[in-house]
Image (tube, helix red, strand yellow):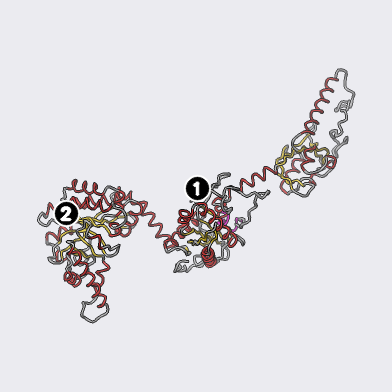
Amino acid sequence: MNGTTTDGATAPESTGSPLMTVCPTCSAPPADGTDQLLDALRASESRFRAAFADAGIGMALIDSTDRVIEANPALAAMIGREVSELVRTHIHDIIEAEDTPRRLYRELVRGERDRLRMEKRLKHREGRTVLSKVTLSLIRDGAGRPMYTLAMVEDITEQRRLWDRLKYQALHDPLTRLPNRALFFERLDAACLRADDHAEPATQTFRRPANGTGAGTGINTGINTGIGVGIGVGTGTNGKADGNGGRPAVPARATTPAAAGERQPNGRRVGLCYLDLDGFAAINETLGHHIGDQLLVAVAARLEIGFARGEGRLVARLGGDEFAVLVADSEGNEQLTALAGRLVAALQKPFEVAGHQLVVTASVGVVERPVEGTTPTDLVKDADSTLYWSKADGRARWTLYDPDRGAHQLTRQLLTTALRPALERGEFSVEYQPLVGLADGVVHGAEALVRWRHPRYGTLSPDRFIPLAEESGAIVPLGKWVLEESCRQARRWLMEFPDTETFVSVNLAARQIWDSDVVADVAQALESSGLPARLLQLEITESALLGPGGRPLQALQALADMGVRIAIDDFGTGYSNLAYLSRLPVHVLKLDGTFIEGFRDPVPGRPGQGSRRTEADEQIVRAMVQLAHALGLTVTAEGIESAAQAERLRLTGCDTAQGWYFARPGEAALVADILRGTRTGEARA
């Protein structure tokens, strides 16, 4: 098609007619000898038209009025039309107009830019949308004025579908098809933005791939290895993901409106229910991981149907048997606790899986708070802690986050982390409480009690950190240090008071027997201190002594063979397996303080509240003392607080006792003073 554009420029031929034979500048016939130039121009035009017509991408030449003056077959086929139909068609009838790209396009047409790249939607004849990548280039005349626009269009519909499938796989769990951890945190980040950030609400609306193929097709028979969150990495089944979980009484409400869960006039809130299936590991182990996988799919379907509906809701699988329900723009604690109650109830209903009727329960941690002042990390951390409070409180319930309990948990974690460094820095010390004979009032020994002189929390008693040390394994080096220090001190008492032969009693944790060579540790402590083995007594609880396996018994027998005294601590509160007593290398029974509490009540025979309990406790203690003596054991009572209590215990036949009546725990000098006889009266005051 020959013609001119509105600006007067000559348009390229569209019919393939020969080039003009006049000079394009002066319109004069070319001079002799220019035939070669004309031939070169014709060849160049032929190559251009061949490239234009046969190009694999769509191409179009557009004039200054935004109408197509020439298009190639690839572009026509891309939108289901003929080439002739496109000529003189307005470009916006082919490419959907948008505000920002239109502004940039006008800048191109005016000559303010030379090239523009964008992704656009093309209108196909059949009504469907073709996704394309469009590159627009400005063609100028010899004077640099804009003449035409060359559009190069690449069909990226299949690429975008592939990208959508890959993105879906990256953001969804391949087993349950629920959003995964990556998408959960993406939506949680959006929910935690301030209101003035205009965050997109975290609703459960996900565009599945256009061809209907879900992520992870054919991968739902996985191997319990976790959840992949990267593109194409999802083998996730019911194993824990790599790292990168109603209570009888709800904690008391805070008095401030925000803490109490009341919606603030100008403040957004966010809530999270973090749940974990109870007993899921047992199903994996007994019925197999393939049944566990199918159960997870059933659980996910029930959660999605029942709890993913509604504005701002998101149900996600975070890994293994852990799920989360995110509520953006929540309305307060009551909304979230009601939701948690429904979650617990919904999962208690049986599941039919591969011919098995499976019953599982769920523990749920609930966190709800204002967006202001919180972060996604804090929200998930607190929800995870609260989840495990639910499990610790009995499972099959929900627990609302309690800041005080959270602070206590944080303190526990800080203490646990600081245990080993504190031992290296010498922050621990040992105090001693005398063990006094009830028949003669003489100090026979002293129990070693470790104290932690914490630089921030002050002096901590054993009940504050010994359980943490046992959980973390720090009890092994700490227990060894206490043993060595106590043996050295007992040796000093022996050197100063050789006639008394005062023994030291050291508590031995079960983990010291399992995780270390306690026999070698004791032998080394005795050898390095020079303390005779008969002056060392080791206390171990019933639960550790009488538990499964033969290692504790073998270790205790070896220690007894060395001459070390063995005492069962807190006797009567553990297994209380009396049959063991005749076969164990035990020398002493230490009665738990609960048996001694009754001795604080009025004396039997005198009217008064508690006399019946006192008589029962006295008979129990008397029977245990007689049994111990029959087996050749001595008996020690703990927690003696008065002279009357000590006297009544003496009448039962109890051998030794300790408690505040005799002396509170103190430094080694306290025992030395009592042994000298200088503080006997004060200790009993």
Furthest-front residue in view?
355
Of helix, strand and loop, which one carries label 1?
A: loop
Asked if residue 546 lies left or right of residue 663, the reply is right
Q: Residue at x 58, y 51 (%)?
A: 172
**Crowding at label 1, few (<14), some or many (≥20) Cα neighbours within 10 Å?**
some
| Quadrant hosting residue 538 | bottom left
- Which one is in front in this view, the residue at disc 2 or the one at disc 1? 1
Mark before the other along the chain sequence, 2 or 1: 1
Q: Residue at x 10, y 54 (%)?
A: 498
Which SS does the magenta portion mostly show?
helix
The quarter of the image holding the N terminus is top right
Of helix, strand and loop, which one carries label 2?
A: helix
Q: Which residue is mark 2?
A: 535
> As displayed, is residue 309 above or below residue 107?
below
Asked if residue 394 lies left or right of residue 566, the reply is right
Residue span colored magenta: 189-198
Which mark is on residue 225? 1
- Label 2, label 1: how far apart the Cα atoms are: 54 Å
The quarter of the image holding the C terminus is bottom left
Q: Residue at x 60, y 55 (%)?
A: 197
> As displayed, is residue 47 above or below residue 233?
above
| Quadrant hosting residue 65 | top right
Q: Callout 1, which amino acid?
A: Thr
Q: Position of residue 174 (x, y in %)?
A: 57, 50
**Crowding at label 2, few (<14), some or many (≥20) Cα neighbours within 10 Å?**
many
Contact check, label 2 and label 1, Cβ < 8 Å? no
Q: Callout 2, which amino acid?
A: Leu
On the question of residue 464 being in view, the answer is yes
